[in-house]
């Protein structure tokens, strides 16, 4: 029985390793980066969908803390952030839940030190449609009005929108 287990494990390893290597090469193609034919930024732009959004935030001189809406993997973001994982209640709901107006939301974000908001294209609508985000219509309107009246668009990398909060 022990020799059968060893043979099975060896066969699984022998079959699994090439499949894993092909998957890494096919999906991520890291060879060009490793041999210096591709820059770090080019590699990340190709493999990390939010890289351009994070670069824009990191290069913004006033960025102190960012609220990430729909961005669940801030691995390459250097600016401190508030975010939620894929299975969490969306951070935007946690931070703004119960807010009845844009000024109230602006005050909450100011108290948290948030200077920027990055919204992943379509993420908020998808979270609302799926029931993951359970905002009331008043809370959704407060957030939309906050973005419109208390922020300005810093950029639109890859369909995302990065806002800088304007302080009075």
Image (cartoon, rainbow, N blue to C red):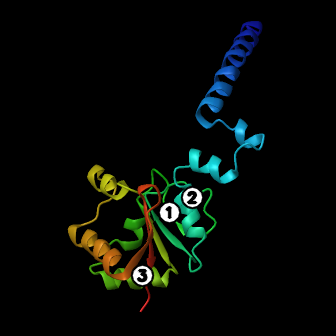
- Quick one: 142 or 48, which is closer to the camera? 48
x%, y% of residue 148? 31, 76
157 left or right of 10?
left
Query: Circle 2 is placed at which residue position?
Result: 74
As drawn, the label of residue 108 is 3
Q: Locate residue 29, reporting x and y percent.
A: 65, 35
Residue 90 drawn above or below residue 12: below
| Residue drawn at the location 46% of the way across and 84% of the way down | 110
Question: What residue appears at the point 50 percent right and 63 percent down from the top-left corner?
Answer: 83
Q: Quadrant of residue 124?
A: bottom left
Residue 107 is left or right of residue 1, and the answer is left
The Cα–Cα distance between marks 3 and 2, rounded to whole angstroms, is 22 Å
| Front label number (2 vs 1) | 2
Q: Say which label, 3 or 2, has the lower sequence index.
A: 2
Q: Which residue does the image show at 46% across and 76% down from the upper left?
A: 164
Q: Secondary structure at mark 3?
A: helix
Q: Around disc 3, counting alpha carbons within 10 Å, would you say few (fewer than 14), some (14 to 19), or many (20 or more)? A: some
Residue 130 location, x and y as percent? Answer: 29, 49
Determine crowd level at label 2: few under 14, some 14-19, many 20+ residues with C-alpha closer than 10 A.
some
- Crowd rating for badge 1 (residues with CA inside 10 Å; few <14, some 14–19, many 20+): many
User: Residue 34 got which mark?
Assistant: none
Q: Is residue 100 above or below residue 73?
A: below
């Amino acid at each position: 029985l022990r020799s059968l287990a060893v043979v099975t494990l060896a066969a699984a390893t022998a079959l699994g390793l090439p499949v894993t290597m092909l998957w890494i090469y096919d999906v991520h193609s890291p060879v060009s980066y490793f041999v210096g034919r591709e820059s770090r930024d080019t590699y990340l732009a190709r493999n990390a969908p939010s890289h351009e959004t994070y670069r824009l935030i990191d290069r913004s001189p006033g960025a102190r803390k960012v609220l990430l809406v729909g961005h669940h993997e801030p691995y390459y973001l250097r600016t401190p952030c508030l975010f939620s994982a894929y299975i969490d209640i969306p951070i935007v709901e946690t931070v703004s839940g119960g807010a009845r107006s844009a000024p109230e939301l602006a005050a909450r974000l100011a108290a948290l030190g948030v200077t920027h908001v990055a919204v992943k294209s379509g993420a908020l609508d998808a979270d609302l449609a799926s029931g993951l985000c359970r905002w009331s219509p008043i809370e959704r309107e407060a957030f939309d009005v906050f973005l419109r009246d208390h922020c300005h668009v810093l950029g639109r990398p890859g369909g995302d929108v990065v806002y800088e909060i304007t302080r009075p």
